[in-house]
Amino acid sequence: MNCLLHSVLLYSKQTSGKPIAFISAGSGLTPLVSMLKSLPESYASAVTFIYAAKNHNHHPLQQEINSALQKLPVSQSLTLYTAPEPEYPSSAYFGTETTLTREALQSALPQEDTRCYVCGPPAFVEAVVSRLHEIGRHDISTENFVPIS
C-alpha cells in the first residue's frame, strides 16, 4: 500500500488502462476529485467514484464529480450517506446500508485489477482498506485526512 500523495506523482503510469476506484469520505474528497478531473476523456476503463458522507448537506463538489464522470466512457458515482434524509437517500445501489460493506465494494468493483485510491479520516481509510483486501483488491494507495483541532 502506497501513500496517496506519493502515488499522485506516478498516477498516469499506474492508471494506464486499469479500472480505477476513488473512495473517499469527508475532506478526503478533495484530492480525489483533482485526480478524477485529470483523467483524459478517452480513458476507456471503468472509473468508479464512491463518496461517504453524513447526508447531502455534507457532500461538497457533487456537481464537479458528476461533470467529470460524464466525460468518461465508462463511469459511475456512488454515494453512501451514513445518516440519510428521506428526500436525499444514498445511491440506490447501497439500499439502506449506512456503511461500505464488503459486499457493496465487491459488487461496485468487480474487476480484481482495479486501482484503488482511498482518502479520508483514518478509521474510514482503515476500514475500507481492510474490506478491499478481503475482496482481493491489493493495488491501493491511501491518505488520511484529519480535522485540525
Image (cartoon, rainbow, N blue to C red):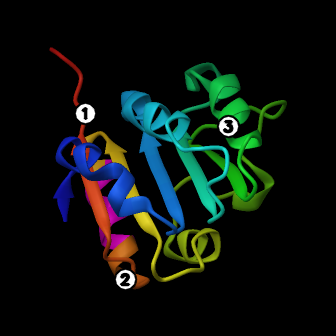
Q: Which residue is mark 1?
A: 145
Which residue is situated farthest in the right direction here?
A: 87
Q: Spot the residue most to the top.
A: 149
- Identify which residue, 34 or 143, lies in the foreground: 34
Which dot, 3 or 2, sits closer to the camera?
2
In the displayed structure, 138 sits above or below 13; it is below
Q: Is residue 62 left or right of residue 25?
A: right
Proximity of marks 2 and 1: CB atoms separated by less than 8 Å: no
Q: Residue at x 64, y 25 (%)?
A: 64
First to last magenta residue range: 124-131
Identify residue type, mark 3: Pro
Q: Quadrant of the C terminus?
A: top left
The overriding secondary structure of the stretch rendered in magenta is: helix
Element carrying mark 1: loop
Could you tell me if the residues under marks 3 and 2 are in contact, i.e. CB atoms within 8 Å?
A: no
Residue 106: image location, x then y, percent:
56, 77
- The question of residue 92 being in magenta is answered with no
Up the image or down, 130 lies above or below 68; here it is below
Q: Which residue is depicted at the point 42% across and 60% down?
A: 15
| C-alpha span from label 1 to label 3 | 23 Å
Is 43 left, or right, of 125 in this rendering? right
Q: Which mark is residue 134?
A: 2
Residue 29 makes an appearance in the image? yes
Q: Which residue is mark 3?
A: 84
Q: Tell me which label, 3 or 2, sits earlier in the chain.
A: 3
Give, as a three-letter code, the residue at label 1: Phe
Residue 54 point in image, percent of width and height: 54, 33
The amino acid at mark 2 is: Glu
Identify which residue is drawn at 19% across, 65% down: 1
